[in-house]
Image (cartoon, rainbow, N blue to C red):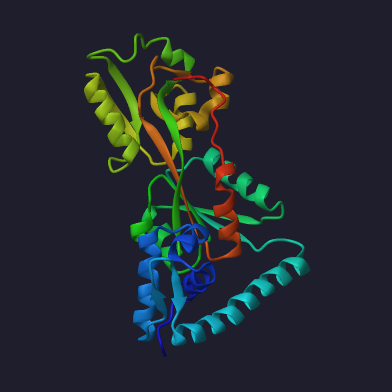
């Protein structure tokens, strides 16, 4: 059996229809180099040259024309099948979402809301896990979308496209009662009890660099990679935590939490989406990503 990757066939089909790798990469949301590598891998797998590559574009070889005809029937019928299933069910197919533990409920909810704007009948199922677990599920084709705080491309197969969608400011927060006991933050040699993210977390590393820069004396009370647990600990007045503003904007407006830093910390929470642009759902996500917003209503630093 020839080890054909159907995603490679799909990329080949789109490229031939587009007439150039440059035009195809925009449709597929891939970089020029990534798409070129996928096409070369397809040729390697079948042992045939499928494309003539020139300065003005690409065209299929005789073998490539035969492969294109098969792709034309196969993917056209596949799209017809999806449309038929949607029409008969009156809804979209389920969207299986994997989210890292370090992603807050607020960010997950906003992303699901974005998917339902694309298709109001979206039936989303969300499972949280560690990066290794989410990557394994993706490689087993058990996920359609991944929400993370870093680019996981190196740990996924070639069918996923990564897109950075937000940089949300991070600040130091505490309950009002605890905040009243902390003055002039940050202040050299200031003693602060904090609950932290794990040592390998990117935000944790930035927070430690910030503490070193401002000569803060941090006492680590504990660790968790769950931002919603950190928020609850802060609300109960147990300690200072760092939070992204999107996650706590309602708490700040209702004065249940107070931002300690008077100036922006420069620390950011990055949000990435990984999706498969070769599927109808993934293509819809890619086209509509500009409409996904993580807007912080508060003016807190």
In front of the other: 44 or 214? 44
In the image, taking residue 200 as reference, residue 17 lies left or right, namely right
Q: Quadrant of the N terminus?
A: bottom left
Q: Can see residue 157?
A: no
Image location of residue 181, percent across then percent down: 38, 10
Q: Can see residue 139?
A: yes
- Residue appearing at x 25%, y 19% in the figure: 214
Residue 182 against residue 295 in the figure, above or below: above
Image location of residue 6, percent across then percent down: 48, 76
- Residue appearing at x 58%, y 52% in the figure: 287
The residue sitting at the bottom extreme is 1
Residue 262 against residue 205 in the figure, above or below: above
Q: Quadrant of residue 54?
A: bottom left
- Residue appearing at x 32%, y 41% in the figure: 201
In the image, taking residue 76 as reference, residue 164 lies left or right, namely left
Residue 50 against residue 266 in the figure, above or below: below
Image location of residue 196, percent across then percent down: 34, 33
The residue sitting at the front extreme is 56
- Residue appearing at x 49%, y 57% in the figure: 26
In front of the other: 81 or 129? 81
Residue 32 against residue 104 in the figure, above or below: below
Q: Quadrant of the C terminus?
A: top left
């Amino acid at each position: 059996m020839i080890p054909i990757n159907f995603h490679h066939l799909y990329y080949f089909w789109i490229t031939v229809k587009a007439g150039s790798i440059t035009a195809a990469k925009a449709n597929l949301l891939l970089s020029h180099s990534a798409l070129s590598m996928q096409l070369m891998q397809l040729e390697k797998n079948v042992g045939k040259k499928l494309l003539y590559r020139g300065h003005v574009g690409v065209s299929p070889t005789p073998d490539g024309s035969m492969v294109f005809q098969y792709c034309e029937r196969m993917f056209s019928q596949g799209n017809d099948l999806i449309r038929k299933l949607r029409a008969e069910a009156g809804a979209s197919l389920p969207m299986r979402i994997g989210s890292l533990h370090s992603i807050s409920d607020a960010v997950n909810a906003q992303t699901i809301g974005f998917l339902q704007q694309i298709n109001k009948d979206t039936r989303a199922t969300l499972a949280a896990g560690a990066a290794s677990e989410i990557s394994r599920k993706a490689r087993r084709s058990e996920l359609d979308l991944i929400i993370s705080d870093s680019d996981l491309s190196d740990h996924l197969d070639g069918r996923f496209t990564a897109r950075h969608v937000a940089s949300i400011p991070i600040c130091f927060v505490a309950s009002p009662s605890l905040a009243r006991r902390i003055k002039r933050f940050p202040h050299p040699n200031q003693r602060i009890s904090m609950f932290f993210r794990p040592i390998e977390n990117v935000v944790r590393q930035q927070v430690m660099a910030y503490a070193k820069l401002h000569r803060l004396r941090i006492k680590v009370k504990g660790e968790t990679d769950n931002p919603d647990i950190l928020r609850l600990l802060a609300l109960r007045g147990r300690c200072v935590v760092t939070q992204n503003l999107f996650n706590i904007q309602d708490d700040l407006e209702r004065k249940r939490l107070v931002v300690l830093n008077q100036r922006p910390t420069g620390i950011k929470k990055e949000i990435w989406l990984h999706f498969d642009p070769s599927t109808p759902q993934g293509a819809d996500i890619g086209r509509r990503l500009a409409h996904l917003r993580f807007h912080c209503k508060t003016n807190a630093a």
